[in-house]
Amino acid sequence: MKQIVIVGAGGLGREIAWVMERIQQIRPAYEILGFCDDAPALQAGTCSNYPLLGKLADATLPSGASFFCAIGNNKIRKAVFAQAMEKGLVPETIVDPTAVIAPDVKLGAGSYVGIGSVVSVGAKLGLGTIVNHHVCIGHDVQADDWCQFSPGVCISGECTVGEGALVGTLGGTIQQRAIGAWATIGAGLVTLRDIPDGTTRVRL
């Protein structure tokens, strides 16, 4: 079994622990060491019945241990992921047992695919990508590092998604659209046009 620490003791971190427990019910896979978090209120005690291990920079962890960076903010997740790598930890990709992923899909290290999600043929997801519950990633979608697809998102076939882009709950695209780096598509918005880098589009 892999020894793994979850970095981030918030809602996403608790969700990751739950999904790992779901995996454990099917096959022994993980020994969850606990959570690391920089928040002052999360330096001691427990989270989801696992120990709080303090700040990542200060935590004493076994050599070769794995980590999952469970931080929702894409820019912070990118920075903390790099910090964990510098500490010698190994990024782990977490996929819920109910997710359906085509055989030729490429998932970047440290990614997450949640309950009931589908990632179709030819898709490629970069480092630290979050695919939440009941998301559909269409065929040949190319998503760069640190993207996040919120619950219920549908990205249609042959779209490209730039680094750090965020698609809000029940948002999506038609086919062959481009979402720029660090762009945001708001909840419930289906975009019919390309979204430039750094742009925010929301439903008013």
Image (cartoon, rainbow, N blue to C red):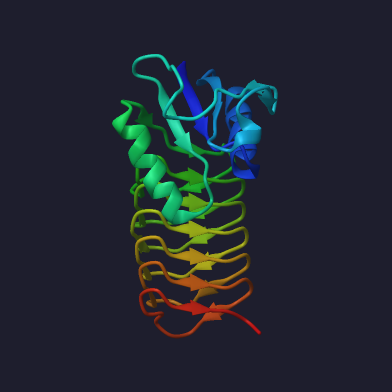
Task: In the rendered view, tell whether residue 48 sits above or below residue 33.
Answer: below
Residue at 60% from the left image edge and 44% from the top image edge: 12
Relative side of 4 to 170, left or right: left
Task: In the rendered view, tell whether residue 33 sits above or below residue 181.
Answer: above
Q: Position of residue 43 (x, y in %)?
A: 60, 27
Residue at 69% from the left image edge and 28% from the top image edge: 48
Taking depth in this image into account, of 25 and 6 the one nearest to the observer is 6
Residue at 53% from the left image edge and 60% from the top image edge: 136
Taking depth in this image into account, of 85 and 123 the one nearest to the observer is 85
Task: In the rendered view, tell whether residue 60 sits above or below residue 130.
Answer: above
Relative side of 5 to 164, left or right: right
Task: In the rendered view, tell whether residue 172 sits above or below residue 163.
Answer: below
Relative side of 77 to 202, left or right: left
Q: Position of residue 121 (x, y in %)?
A: 38, 56
Residue 9 visible somewhere in the drawing: yes
Taking depth in this image into account, of 100 and 197 the one nearest to the observer is 197
